[in-house]
């Protein structure tokens, strides 16, 4: 039974069909519900929208514009809902606790007629909303829509009947929101589940973080420099969360992933009919980040034309949508990042100097992982703990595996380390992950590095590649020298494989038979001494 004396508040995820599905004139679930409820005389006063990233924050803004065009007076409140995996029940559930607490704080009171819409978002998102209501975590009714094509040409909605479904009760600590507050433990779990905890051991990374948190107090642009996978997005989120705009949205844009022809529309939006295919207006990422932070990753990949418009947007705090002459306010804090050499690009004429000067008010350099090796072990431990928690396992790295991780160069930085451990965990035959469990390219690179270094040391010419080393006046025993080099590779492979000859052979691109034959014949003098002594 509706209580019309209370403020009616809708809570829903923004999905791919909001405000309109792609190439479809029929409104999506959220817009359909708002239109139909308004016509029926029981419209919603507020709409609290969970947006899982910049694309959905923009869709939420588009939804608000379309609702205004329909004469709907609903007040819209986008809620940033960052997820790594939109079908991970545990992550969504944990983050939902944080999101509902955010709504409670912004609303100031739960004295409303709360409604969860179960139509937008992934099935996992809809399920968590159902559980939140049915468990008493949040005092909301459940509503589901019936598309017009299944309801005689008119969109309809109905309350979800839960008669006959057992009521699920959480422990008292988790059920606290029923008395107007979420337990702080839920918020802590949600924060931990977001996956952006930073491991800070190395002085270089600690200094980068200190500088970032200091810059967070101001609204000036920040430029982050560093290789791909060094944690630029995590640092950008920390700056946003520690600043005065933390309550606003955080919108991330990967500039290198935007087709050049669409970059202007992606950032600044467009009006209906601005170009072929623009059958509906679009707000753009700048306006989606209104009151919050816009993070432009790989900003060096933007074209010169877009760079000029970006400069104007930063300086004037306005954007002009494609196809329009009317500027629109865009009050957002800008953080940019790149792994490219911008001063060199300026000299080459591919990056604007005036934009560079405007972006580099605060410059933060993030060190690559091979320059912060003291962080490799704690990072690996955190990734393994996260994997084990998610899948209920007890995988762990052996000391030999840790040594291999710490000796690898990590050209892909933290992201490569995380992916390597995921790969090892998914394919390992036991809970103990040794060197042989790690991706082959990491093992090969380490073996090659050790072998070349040992060969150089054996030749007495540190830093010189063996094939070009000079021949001494007295000559050289080439056969003996080549055998020495071969043994250095073989012993490195055996050490990494913990003595397993089949694994060592695979690392060197040999069959087990060929490897054993080499040990038995060509390398018998070394092998007789014990392969451990050859390390």
Image: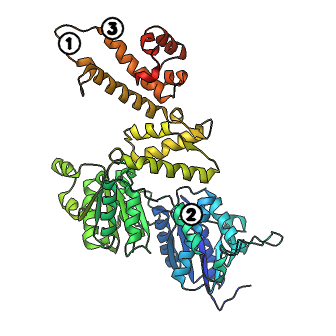
The residue that disc 2 covers is 15
Query: Residue at horizontal 51%, vertical 78%?
Result: 76
Q: Quadrant of the C terminus?
A: top left
State which quadrant residue 318 falls in.
Answer: bottom left
**Is residue 71 among the parts visible in the rendering?**
no
Task: Compare marks 2 and 1 and give the one earlier in the sequence.
Answer: 2
Residue 97 drawn at (x, y percent)? 59, 70
Q: Residues within 10 Å of mark 2 (few under 14, many from 20)?
A: many
The residue that disc 3 covers is 479
Badge 2 element: loop
Of residue 199 and residue 139, the one placed in the foreground of this image is: 199
Badge 1 element: loop
The residue that disc 1 covers is 471
Cα gap from disc 3 to disc 1, whole angstroms = 14 Å
Q: Is residue 446 above or below residue 71?
A: above
Task: Compare marks 3 and 1 and give the one earlier in the sequence.
Answer: 1
């Amino acid at each position: 039974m509706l209580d019309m004396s209370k403020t009616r508040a809708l809570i829903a995820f923004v999905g791919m069909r909001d405000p309109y599905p792609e190439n479809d004139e029929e409104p999506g679930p959220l817009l359909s519900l708002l239109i139909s409820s308004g016509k029926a005389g029981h419209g919603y006063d507020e709409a609290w929208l969970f947006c899982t990233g910049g694309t959905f924050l923009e869709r939420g803004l588009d939804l608000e514009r379309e609702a205004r065009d329909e004469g709907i007076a609903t007040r819209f409140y986008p809620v940033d809902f960052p997820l790594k995996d939109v079908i991970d029940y545990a992550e969504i559930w944990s983050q939902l606790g944080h999101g509902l607490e955010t709504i409670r704080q912004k609303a100031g009171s739960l004295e409303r007629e709360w409604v969860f819409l179960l139509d937008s978002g992934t099935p996992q998102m809809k399920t968590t909303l159902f559980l939140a209501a049915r468990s008493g975590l949040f005092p909301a009714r459940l509503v589901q829509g019936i598309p017009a094509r299944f309801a005689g040409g008119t969109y309809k909605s109905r309350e979800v009947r839960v008669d006959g479904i057992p009521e699920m009760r959480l422990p008292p600590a988790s059920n606290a929101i029923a008395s107007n507050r979420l337990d702080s433990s839920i918020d802590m779990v949600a924060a931990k589940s977001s996956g952006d905890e930073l491991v800070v051991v190395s002085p270089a990374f600690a200094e980068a973080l200190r500088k970032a948190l200091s810059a967070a107090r101001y609204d000036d642009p920040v430029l982050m420099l560093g290789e791909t996978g060094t944690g630029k997005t995590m640092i950008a989120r920390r700056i946003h969360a520690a600043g005065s705009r933390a309550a606003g949205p955080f919108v991330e844009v990967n500039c290198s992933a935007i087709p050049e022809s669409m970059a202007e529309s992606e950032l600044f939006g467009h009006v209906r009919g601005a170009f072929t295919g623009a059958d509906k207006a679009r707000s753009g990422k700048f306006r989606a980040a209104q009151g919050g932070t816009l993070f432009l990753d790989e900003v060096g990949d933007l074209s010169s034309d877009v760079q000029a418009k970006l400069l104007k947007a930063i300086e004037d705090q306005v954007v002009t949508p494609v196809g329009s002459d009317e500027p629109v306010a865009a009050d957002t804090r800008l953080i940019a990042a790149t792994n490219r050499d911008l001063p060199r690009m300026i000299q080459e004429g591919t990056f604007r100097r005036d934009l560079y000067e405007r972006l580099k008010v605060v410059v933060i350099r993030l060190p690559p992982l091979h320059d912060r090796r003291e962080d490799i072990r704690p990072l690996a431990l955190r990734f393994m703990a996260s994997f084990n928690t998610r899948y209920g396992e007890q995988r762990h790295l052996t000391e030999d595996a840790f040594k291999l991780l710490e000796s690898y160069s990590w050209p892909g930085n933290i992201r490569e380390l995380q992916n390597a451990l995921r790969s090892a965990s998914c394919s390992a035959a036991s809970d103990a992950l040794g060197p042989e469990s790690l991706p082959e390219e990491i093992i090969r690179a380490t073996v090659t590095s050790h072998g070349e270094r040992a060969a150089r040391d054996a030749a007495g010419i540190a830093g010189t590649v063996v094939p070009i080393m000079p021949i001494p006046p007295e000559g050289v025993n080439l056969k003996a020298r080549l055998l020495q080099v071969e043994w250095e590779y073989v012993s490195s492979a055996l050490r990494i494989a913990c003595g397993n000859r089949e694994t060592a052979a695979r690392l060197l691109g040999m069959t087990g038979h060929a490897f054993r034959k080499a040990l038995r014949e060509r390398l018998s003098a070394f092998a007789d001494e014990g392969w451990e002594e050859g390390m």
